[in-house]
Amino acid sequence: MENNIFELASRKQFRYSLNKGTINTEDLWELSLETLDKLAKSLNKELKESEEESFIKTRTVANKTLEAKFEVVKHVINVKLAEAEEKAEKAKKQAKKEQLLELINRKELQSLENKSIEELTAELQTL
């Protein structure tokens, strides 16, 4: 079902209830992780409340739709979490790169400072 949840969501025109109204599937991508978490909790609670244990009844269409909505929201959360982790890792690597470049610059400056006046003069004349 995972592969087709967005097709199902678009065909069935899923709507999600928030305290500020209803949104469609595409709008989920604009929500914060905190709001998505609240929505997932709400859908999960609704799903659990709708599941009455029965050994002869099959799942209703409403339950299947609710499960699909929950899966869509969980997928969006997982993607956004992965993107946030990737962004944090990228920022960490960039900070490390800047730190290394700063150290290289200091070492080059230190190397120049350790040269004699004659070496510095000779290097200056070659420029």
Image (cartoon, helix red, strand yellow):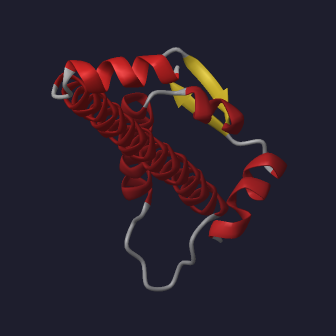
- Residue 55 in percent (x, y) is at 43, 85
Compared with 51, 81 (above or below) is above
Instruction: Write the residue at 78% across / 42% down.
Output: 13
- Residue 83 in percent (x, y) is at 49, 44
State left or right for residue 41 relative to residue 17. left
- The number of callouts visible is 0
Give the camera-side residue of 95 and 18: 95
Give the camera-side residue of 83 and 105: 105
Compared with 8, 4 (above or below) is below
Q: Residue furthest left?
A: 114
- Name the quadrant containing residue 25: top right
State left or right for residue 45 relative to residue 75. left
- Residue 98 in percent (x, y) is at 34, 31
Compared with 81, 120 (above or below) is above
- Name the quadrant containing residue 39: top left
Give the camera-side residue of 97 and 85: 97
State left or right for residue 121 relative to residue 61. left
Compared with 32, 12 (above or below) is below
Instruction: Write the residue at 79% across / 56% down.
Output: 7
Instruction: Write the residue at 23% across / 27% down.
Output: 106
Instruction: Write the residue at 34% across / 33% down.
Output: 101
Q: Residue furthest right?
A: 11
Q: Quadrant of the N terminus?
A: bottom right
